[in-house]
Image: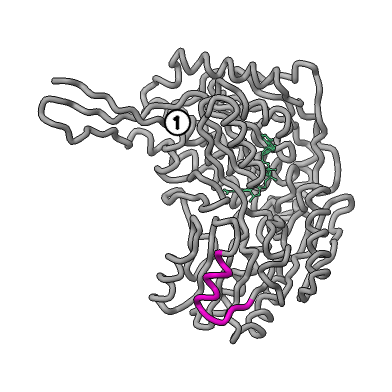
Amino acid sequence: MNKQDLAYWQQQAQSLTIEGRAFINGEYVDASNQETFDCISPVDGRKLSNIALCQETEANQAVKCARKVFEQGTWSKAAPVKRKAVMLKFADLIEKHGDELALLETLDMGKPINDALNVDIPGALRSIRWSAEAIDKIYDEVAPTADNELGLVTREAVGVVAAIVPWNFPLVMASWKIGPALVAGNSVILKPSEKSPLTAIKLAALAKEAGIPDGVFNVLPGFGHQVGKTLALHNDIDTLVFTGSTGVAKQLMIYAGESNMKRVWTEAGGKSPNIVFADAPNLDEAAIAAAGAICFNQGEVCTAGSRLLVEASIKDEFIEKVKTAILSWQPGNPLDPNTNVGAIVDQTQYERILGYINKGQDEQATLCCGGKKSQPVDGGFYIEPTMFSEVDNSMAIASDEIFGPVLSVITFENMEEAINIANDTPYGLAAGIWTRDLSKAHKMAKAVRAGSVWVNQWDGGDMTAPFGGFKQSGNGRDKSLHAFNKYTEVKATWIKL
Ligand code: NAD
């Protein structure tokens, strides 16, 4: 038996020890009233573990110790090079426990084990290592002042950071936040989604083993409307970083306004247009990418290419190509390394996606493929990747973020119409443009209101470039040096000479 076998991962899953307690001030602890909630695997509907139900008491405890250690300066005032060394050790430990973390991710939220191993773990490592390596290379500034003054522009850690993250890439989204937040010297409270708390809880032990001082990194599992809301309203949290839905992002901004005006940085939803012109360099490649853009991670991706805009002259030919490509993505047991479509995260999301598939049919869109439940594993939640054509941008399947494997194909006649349809959405996270015409590519890239634009590819990116949204897709940027803006305050110091 080896890692290429389903049986290997099934056996690993059976022998896995799962930690479900919160992590506060360097220790795993139960919720103070001993309350828990169930962690259910979408793979087969099995209960995996009890999870500590953190609420106000735990939030207050975590904030108190996070503040205390921040003021003491053990971490916050340590030399950047020292924090860097600890964070690199943290990354090494994540890598060492990579298989276990990948398995937890798959069991907890249903993604294929192959993706967890080859996308999520490397993504988390890259974020933490890149941020760690950056911290002792960022210099402050000296202002161009008159000769009798010295103006220093310095950055300092903001203080206590709460990071509230979603369930679709639990470890990666957490790492995009905690990498730069911790290495910049802040104390951090991580609130994972109630649907996928396991890898965040495991991270805590690795952070401690790496040498991150007690109180600097805390993990509070629980529900958004309970512990999440308490953190967002807390008067002793300086910055709230969030990845999740646009609706919750807006609520968090209200909470900040109602409390201490903490900085709120949001990475929110999307309904991204993938625009294919008749002069795309390679229509087969574009079709394969269009299928991947909606099938990868069960379509539960903020940047899913959920609106496929196709130039009318190639519509029939291109739809056939995409359909063929989508048929190579079929739900299977997420623990099988050959599976490319896993389980939908839970029953609520499963029913929501099926609801949209019904709505698409009610709205008279044409169902080209998929549209049905699937059952590769008893008790789990699986849906066939689905494509609708004859979609109008005003239909619910084109305007709402479904967050599942449901693709809407919309046709356009010319560039102007493509731009209008692409931008006719409250979101602005990402866009794809397929054309061999360099001038058209540049004009389109400028015209589309999105934080990431991909030309003749889908989903390019790395830690070296910022990631985030225009419009209601958010207001912050993860990754790259831009991410440090969220975790540092800028101070101007004027010295009379
Ligand atoms: P969600 O907004 O429902 O939940 C996200 C987090 O917010 C969870 O931890 C949840 O418990 C918490 N939360 C919910 N209500 C809260 C409240 N009232 N106060 C405080 N916290 C609260 O989102 P989700 O369903 O977990 O994730 C899917 C969404 O995330 C999609 O909209 C997707 O586009 C978005 N997303 C965005 C990005 C990005 O980088 N822009 C990346 C991944 C996911």
Res. 393 image quadrant? bottom right
Q: Is residue 422 magenta?
A: yes
Pick whichever, 477 or 196, lies toward us: 477
What x and y, as percent, mark residue 297?
Answer: 67, 55
What x and y, as percent, mark residue 311?
Answer: 58, 80
Q: Around disc 1, counting alpha carbons within 10 Å, would you say few (fewer than 14), some (14 to 19), or many (20 or more)?
A: many
What x and y, as percent, mark residue 99?
Answer: 65, 42
Prevailing secondary structure class for the magenta stretch in the rendered image: helix
| Residue 92 makes an appearance in the image | no
The residue positioned 18% from the left and 26% from the top of the image is 150
Pick whichever, 233 or 52, lies toward us: 233
Res. 173 image quadrant? top right
| Residue 127 makes an appearance in the image | yes
Question: Is residue 257 shown above or below 61?
Answer: below
Would you name the residue on which mark 1 appears? 183
Q: Residue furthest left?
A: 147
The residue positioned 53% from the left and 66% from the top of the image is 432
Q: Is residue 378 magenta?
A: no
Ligand 1 appears in which quadrant? top right
Highlighted range, magenta: 411-423
Question: Is residue 311 shown above or below 204?
Answer: below
In what element is the residue under mark 1? helix
The residue positioned 42% from the left and 37% from the top of the image is 484
Pick whichever, 405 or 88, lies toward us: 405
Is residue 5 rendered to the left or right of residue 482?
right
The residue positioned 78% from the left and 59% from the top of the image is 332
Tag 1: amino acid: Val
What x and y, as percent, mark residue 390?
Answer: 71, 77
Is residue 242 rendered to the left or right of residue 157?
right
